[in-house]
Image: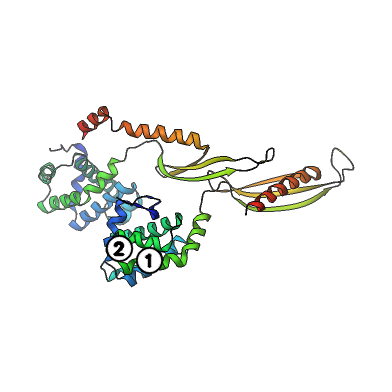
Amino acid sequence: MDRFRFCGDLDCPDWVLAEMSTLARMSSVKMKLLCVQVIKDLLDEGIDYDKVSKLTSDAKFESGDIKASIAVLSFILSSAAKHDVDSDSLSSELQQLGLPKEHTTGLCKSYEDKHSALQEKLREISLRLGRLEAVNWRVDYTLSSSELKQVNEPTVQLKLQAQDPETDSTQTTVVSITADKFRVLLTELKQAQTMMNALQ
Amino acid sequence: MLFVLSEEHKHLGFLSEVDPAVVGESGRIAVEFLKKGSNPKIYEGALNVWSGSVQHGLEGLMYLLTESCKLTISEEDFQDSVLVLGFSEELTELLLQLYLENRKEIRQILSKPAPSLPHYHSLEWRLDVQLSSRPLRHQLKPTVTLKLHLEDGARRSAHVLQTDPATLQHLIDELERALAELKSSHCRRILHNIQ
């Protein structure tokens, strides 16, 4: 079996090959509209299952066929975006797998239109641990305490809301920082920021 | 192969005293209970029969189905086994249909072993390069971060792991060695004998 770029330079999975004939049972126009729905699903915009059943009713798809065609289109579109395959290469590879020319053209047009949006979405869902969700701060001035009558010191209170890496639930941490420590923190963070800017 | 019906099965007696429609309904409820666990509220609502005997009756029906599925008995054997209970032909036919229609699904439910180790659900990964840290600038340290999602029945857990490429390669080699064991003649002989 040939290696396919849209499969990451690996063999095409057997099930994908098998579903090419299922897709060919639809008209190319309806298949392109189905691609639009699948892309909406991949972008988390919500898939309209009513539209999907209307699109597949002419080809007399059973529920198994509908699920299979959505699965294979999802795979092709997301895998092609994952490996940054250009529209022309995708077109020639799909035709090699037996997808008729009109169907391939429709699919690749949808792919090209939404290529950047798909990659952006995949970038967004890439593994990240402990995402910082919100930062809140407050500056206080301590006048006096039980230990010392005249304290006269500013402090920063930082409230950090971040995702727990293993449970994905939001954890809140509050820290209070004296002026000196805060100056050190700020300097270090600015150095990190300079480095990040240099990389972008 | 016949299976012998015992004391427990006299509870199924209630089935011959009610309508075929009720028998059908009881059958459906018994299968639902097998799939999702029993729910006593259903006893009261669905069947207008006294609660105590309904519960035993349903449990009897569930036992009949699970034992038949466990042994995957043939149609004739099922009919012969049920004959002992002295049901009408119509009722026996209903029970047989119930058994045949749900056999595959019930066998699937029975095949899941009870307590088990958490098993693999999915794996997310990320390749990073550390360029700088607070104490040291100008580094080039690649790391692979993995988030292993495991499933144990209904519970999902995630484990975050980090490794350098050399260790990852070692991990891959060890796992491939484990897979290769399956192809060794020793393993193949055993698998052949089981299947």
Q: State the residue position of label 2.
A: A99
Mark drawn on residue A70: none
Q: Quadrant of residue A40?
A: bottom left
Q: Is residue B57 above or below residue B176?
A: below
- Callout 2 and callout 1 share a chain: yes
Note whether residue A54 is visible.
Answer: no
Pick the front one: B37 or B195: B195
Q: What residue sits right under mark 1 in the picture? A: A107
Spot occupied by residue A32 in the image (x, y as percentages of width and height): 37, 69
> Is mark 2 in CB contact (under 8 Å) with mark 1?
yes
Q: Does B132 appear above or below A90?
A: above
- Residue type at mark 2? Leu
Look at the numbered disc 1 and give the secondary structure of its residue: helix
* Front residue (pair B147, B109): B147
Q: Is residue B93 above or below residue A65?
A: above
What kind of element bears circle 2? Answer: loop
C-alpha gap between disc 2 and disc 1:
10 Å
Name the residue: 68% across, 38% down.
B136
